[in-house]
Image: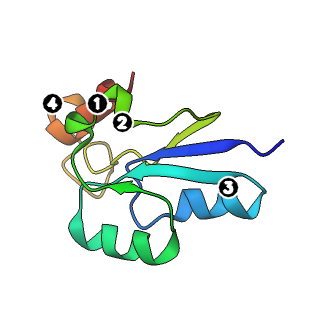
Amino acid sequence: MTYKVAGLFGGVGGIELGFEQAGFKSIWANEIDDKAAITYQLNHEHPLAVKSINDVANNEVPDHDVLVGGFPCQAFSIAGYRKGFEDERGNVFFEVV
């Protein structure tokens, strides 16, 4: 059986690429950044929703076995302001939950 992977906060597609190399099949992803999405689409053939996770409806995400995501870390990183959940980028986690 080949497990189907859906990806959130896809970036340039590194997480999905790793899963594909491990024998999984990536079937869908989302990414908000237009420039990252260009690279993502060069690395993958499956559909990519280029928009905020806040704008992705539940019925847009196809049936999948594994949900992966590279959540934005700027709100928590020591390289940033470390505002955590007070930074809007730190709250996108709750959209998934």
Question: Residue 57: which numbered mark, if any?
Answer: 1
Say whether disc 3 or disc 4 marks the residue closer to the N-terminus.
Answer: 3
Q: Eyeballing the image, is 26 above or below 58?
A: below
Disc 3/disc 4 C-alpha distance (Å): 32 Å
Q: Eyeballing the image, is 10 above or below 17?
A: above
Q: Which residue is mark 4?
A: 86
Residue 43 percent location from the top left of the image: 51, 74
Identify the element where label 3 is drawn.
helix
Q: Quadrant of residue 57?
A: top left
Residue 25 percent location from the top left of the image: 67, 53
Q: Is residue 62 left or right of residue 73?
A: right
Query: Nearer the observer, disc 2 or disc 3?
Result: 2
Disc 4/disc 2 C-alpha distance (Å): 28 Å
Say whether disc 4 or disc 1 marks the residue closer to the N-terminus.
Answer: 1
Q: Quadrant of residue 54?
A: top left
Q: Which residue is mark 2?
A: 60
Residue shown at the point (68%, 60%) measured from the top left? 20
> Amino acid type of disc 3?
Phe
Say whether disc 4 or disc 2 marks the residue closer to the N-terminus.
Answer: 2
> Amino acid type of disc 2?
Glu
Q: Are marks 1 and 2 in contact (CB under 8 Å)?
A: yes
